[in-house]
Image (tube, rainbow, N blue to C red):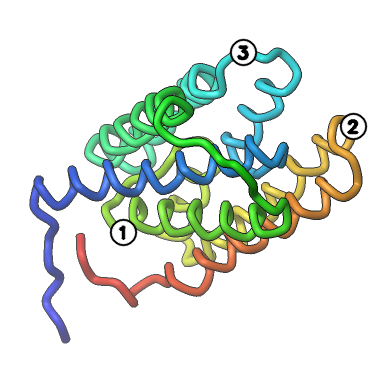
Amino acid sequence: MSEKLHHTLSEDIQALLIGSLNVALSVQVFKYANLQTGGTAGLAFLGHYLSHLPFGWIFFVINLPFYLFAWKAMGWPFTLKTFSAVALLSLYSELLPHWISFGHLNPWFAGILGGLLAGNGILILARHKASLGGVGVLALYLQETRGWRAGKLQMGADVLILLSAASILDPIRMAISILGAVTLNLVIAVNHRPGRYIGM
């Protein structure tokens, strides 16, 4: 049996920086195309669309109640990494509009690209024992303790969150948002399987 390889501190730091940046880029793609996504990011999008408050601040505040559960269920290293990832995503989300803009972005491609970027970022974080809080904490905990697939759990929660946006998105944007959520969760479901990746 292969020996588990533990990540170094520098490897964890680069994973937090890069994983959060991937998800932040997906946030910019979704915002530009006026799309919705799932998880606590989806809840933050709802708050942003309805109140026009900054997405990054809403996302950071929504995640605050989940840290106590994360600490009790997954331990302080996971909680600290998750807090760092959430803080980085919140910061990136406010800085990226000053660093990048889109001249043209097909909305259907935006849904797929956003889903791929977010799925890849979440996968990087998960492999370094971190998440973006909220539903992700619960999904990873149930995968670790019960063997339930995180991608399927996340997909179920995402459907409920996406449906809550039906009143503010037109049917086409809604369909594209669902496509983005399915793309995101397929990346996680296919690539994040218990025992397949042995880095710690």
Q: Could you say which is closer to the camera, residue 17 or residue 7?
A: 17
* Badge 1 density bin: few <14, some 14–19, many ≥20, Cα 10 Å: some
* Amino acid type indicated by mark 1: Arg
The residue positioned farthest toward the front in the image shown: 103
Secondary structure found at label 3: loop
Secondary structure found at label 1: helix
| Residue 112: image location, x then y, percent | 63, 60
Q: Earlier in the sequence, mark 3 or mark 1?
A: 3
> Relative to 184, is 75 on the left or the right?
left
| Rendered residue at 71%/41% (across/down) | 35
In the figure, 88 relative to 57: above or below?
below
Determine the image quadrant of residue 197.
Answer: bottom left
* Badge 3 density bin: few <14, some 14–19, many ≥20, Cα 10 Å: few
The residue positioned farthest toward the bottom in the image shown: 1
Secondary structure found at label 2: loop
Q: Are marks 3 and 2 in contact (CB under 8 Å)?
A: no
In 3D space, how far apart are the residues under numbered discs 1 and 2 (Cα atoms)? 36 Å
Q: Mark 1 points at which residue?
A: 127
| Rendered residue at 66%/54% (across/down) | 111
| Residue 50: image location, x then y, percent | 75, 18
Q: Mark 2 points at which residue?
A: 167
In the figure, 27 relative to 48: above or below?
below
Q: Name the residue under label 3.
A: 53
- The quadrant of the image that shows the N terminus is bottom left
| Rendered residue at 50%/74% (across/down) | 190
| Residue 138: image location, x then y, percent | 51, 45
- The quadrant of the image that shows the C terminus is bottom left
